[in-house]
Image (cartoon, grey):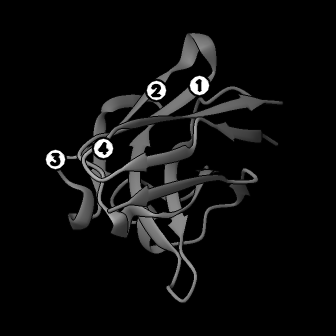
Amino acid sequence: QVQLVESGGGSVHAGGSLRLFCTASGSTYSDYTMSWFRLSPGKERQGVAAIDADDEEDTTYTDAVKGRLTISLDKSKSTLYLQMSRLKPDDTAMYYCAADRYWGVGVILRRRPDYWGQGTQVTVSS
Protein backbone atom coordinates (compact mmCIF):
# COMPACT_ATOMS: atom_id res chain seq x y z
CA GLN A 1 0.00 0.00 0.00
CA VAL A 2 1.29 3.47 -0.84
CA GLN A 3 0.85 6.64 1.19
CA LEU A 4 0.78 9.94 -0.69
CA VAL A 5 1.44 13.44 0.60
CA GLU A 6 0.97 16.55 -1.55
CA SER A 7 2.58 19.96 -1.14
CA GLY A 8 3.34 23.06 -3.15
CA GLY A 9 -0.11 24.61 -3.42
CA GLY A 10 -0.69 28.31 -2.87
CA SER A 11 -2.21 31.49 -4.22
CA VAL A 12 -1.13 33.15 -7.45
CA HIS A 13 -2.44 35.68 -9.92
CA ALA A 14 -3.71 34.60 -13.32
CA GLY A 15 -0.81 33.85 -15.62
CA GLY A 16 1.38 32.72 -12.76
CA SER A 17 3.01 29.37 -12.06
CA LEU A 18 3.09 26.78 -9.30
CA ARG A 19 4.71 23.39 -8.87
CA LEU A 20 2.92 20.69 -6.95
CA PHE A 21 4.73 17.81 -5.29
CA CYS A 22 3.54 14.38 -4.24
CA THR A 23 5.82 12.16 -2.21
CA ALA A 24 5.16 8.45 -1.77
CA SER A 25 6.00 6.12 1.06
CA GLY A 26 5.18 2.53 1.87
CA SER A 27 5.79 1.33 -1.66
CA THR A 28 7.73 2.12 -4.78
CA TYR A 29 6.03 3.62 -7.81
CA SER A 30 6.65 0.47 -9.83
CA ASP A 31 3.50 -0.84 -11.57
CA TYR A 32 1.46 2.23 -10.64
CA THR A 33 -0.34 4.74 -12.77
CA MET A 34 0.12 8.09 -11.04
CA SER A 35 -2.28 10.94 -11.53
CA TRP A 36 -3.48 14.34 -10.40
CA PHE A 37 -7.15 15.13 -9.84
CA ARG A 38 -8.81 18.33 -8.75
CA LEU A 39 -12.01 19.28 -6.99
CA SER A 40 -13.66 22.68 -6.91
CA PRO A 41 -16.78 23.68 -4.94
CA GLY A 42 -19.86 22.98 -7.00
CA LYS A 43 -17.99 20.97 -9.61
CA GLU A 44 -17.37 17.29 -10.13
CA ARG A 45 -13.95 15.80 -9.45
CA GLN A 46 -11.81 16.14 -12.57
CA GLY A 47 -8.87 14.05 -13.68
CA VAL A 48 -6.12 16.46 -14.69
CA ALA A 49 -3.05 14.45 -15.72
CA ALA A 50 -1.63 10.95 -15.47
CA ILE A 51 1.68 9.18 -16.02
CA ASP A 52 2.76 5.57 -16.27
CA ALA A 53 5.40 5.10 -13.56
CA ASP A 54 7.11 2.41 -15.64
CA ASP A 55 7.09 4.45 -18.87
CA GLU A 56 7.40 8.12 -17.98
CA GLU A 57 6.82 9.24 -21.56
CA ASP A 58 3.31 7.77 -21.41
CA THR A 59 1.25 10.69 -20.15
CA THR A 60 -2.21 12.09 -20.66
CA TYR A 61 -3.96 15.36 -19.86
CA THR A 62 -7.48 16.63 -19.76
CA ASP A 63 -8.11 19.11 -22.58
CA ALA A 64 -8.50 22.09 -20.25
CA VAL A 65 -4.87 21.91 -19.11
CA LYS A 66 -3.00 20.73 -22.21
CA GLY A 67 -0.02 22.93 -22.94
CA ARG A 68 -0.12 24.56 -19.51
CA LEU A 69 0.35 21.73 -16.99
CA THR A 70 3.05 19.07 -17.09
CA ILE A 71 3.17 15.86 -15.07
CA SER A 72 6.49 14.22 -14.32
CA LEU A 73 8.02 11.69 -11.97
CA ASP A 74 11.36 11.28 -10.21
CA LYS A 75 11.37 7.74 -8.89
CA SER A 76 14.78 8.22 -7.24
CA LYS A 77 13.10 10.82 -5.00
CA SER A 78 9.71 9.01 -4.87
CA THR A 79 8.17 12.27 -6.02
CA LEU A 80 5.47 13.07 -8.53
CA TYR A 81 5.28 16.63 -9.87
CA LEU A 82 2.70 18.83 -11.53
CA GLN A 83 4.25 21.91 -13.10
CA MET A 84 1.50 24.49 -13.57
CA SER A 85 2.00 27.47 -15.88
CA ARG A 86 -0.24 30.19 -17.30
CA LEU A 87 -2.70 29.50 -14.54
CA LYS A 88 -6.30 30.64 -14.87
CA PRO A 89 -8.95 31.34 -12.21
CA ASP A 90 -10.74 28.18 -13.43
CA ASP A 91 -7.73 26.18 -12.21
CA THR A 92 -8.64 27.07 -8.63
CA ALA A 93 -9.24 23.78 -6.81
CA MET A 94 -7.98 21.30 -4.28
CA TYR A 95 -5.45 19.15 -6.12
CA TYR A 96 -5.03 15.50 -5.19
CA CYS A 97 -2.30 13.04 -6.05
CA ALA A 98 -3.52 9.50 -6.72
CA ALA A 99 -2.11 6.08 -7.49
CA ASP A 100 -3.58 2.93 -8.96
CA ARG A 101 -2.20 -0.42 -10.01
CA TYR A 102 -5.11 -1.51 -12.20
CA TRP A 103 -6.10 1.34 -14.49
CA GLY A 104 -3.72 2.57 -17.16
CA VAL A 105 -3.00 6.04 -18.44
CA GLY A 106 -5.66 5.77 -21.12
CA VAL A 107 -8.56 5.50 -18.69
CA ILE A 108 -7.39 6.55 -15.21
CA LEU A 109 -8.69 10.11 -15.49
CA ARG A 110 -12.22 8.71 -15.86
CA ARG A 111 -11.85 6.30 -12.93
CA ARG A 112 -11.35 6.57 -9.19
CA PRO A 113 -7.81 5.48 -8.23
CA ASP A 114 -7.30 3.34 -5.16
CA TYR A 115 -4.89 5.58 -3.25
CA TRP A 116 -5.18 9.30 -2.56
CA GLY A 117 -3.31 12.03 -0.80
CA GLN A 118 -4.90 14.63 1.44
CA GLY A 119 -4.84 17.39 -1.18
CA THR A 120 -3.19 20.77 -1.62
CA GLN A 121 -5.10 23.97 -2.41
CA VAL A 122 -4.40 26.04 -5.50
CA THR A 123 -6.06 29.44 -5.74
CA VAL A 124 -5.74 31.61 -8.84
CA SER A 125 -7.01 35.17 -8.69
CA SER A 126 -7.91 37.27 -11.70
> Are the residues tagged 2 and 3 within 8 Å (C-beta)?
no
Query: Would you identify the image quadrant in which residue 112 lies?
Result: bottom right
> Are the residues tagged 1 and 2 within 8 Å (C-beta)?
yes
Q: Is residue 111 above or below residue 119?
A: below
Q: Earlier in the sequence, mark 4 or mark 2?
A: 4
Q: Which residue is mark 2?
A: 73
**Marks 4/1: CA–CA distance:** 16 Å
Indicate which label's residue lies in the foreground, 1 or 3: 3
Q: Residues within 10 Å of mark 4 (few under 14, many from 20)?
A: many
**Marks 4/2: CA–CA distance:** 11 Å
In the image: residue 103, left or right of residue 70:
right
> Are the residues tagged 4 and 2 within 8 Å (C-beta)?
no
Q: Amino acid at mark 3?
A: Gly
In the image: residue 19, left or right of residue 40:
left
Q: Which residue is mark 3?
A: 67
Where the C terminus falls, by quadrant?
bottom left
Q: Earlier in the sequence, mark 1 or mark 2?
A: 2
Q: Earlier in the sequence, mark 1 or mark 3?
A: 3
Give the number of the disc on residue 79.
Answer: 1
Q: Residues within 10 Å of mark 1 (few under 14, many from 20)?
A: some
Q: Earlier in the sequence, mark 4 or mark 1?
A: 4
Q: Is residue 21 above or below residue 16?
A: above
Give the x, y percent position of residue 21. 57, 32
Q: Earlier in the sequence, mark 2 or mark 3?
A: 3
Q: Which residue is mark 4?
A: 59
Q: Amino acid at mark 4?
A: Thr
Q: Earlier in the sequence, mark 3 or mark 4?
A: 4
In the image: residue 77, left or right of residue 49:
right
Q: Is residue 53 above or below residue 37?
A: above
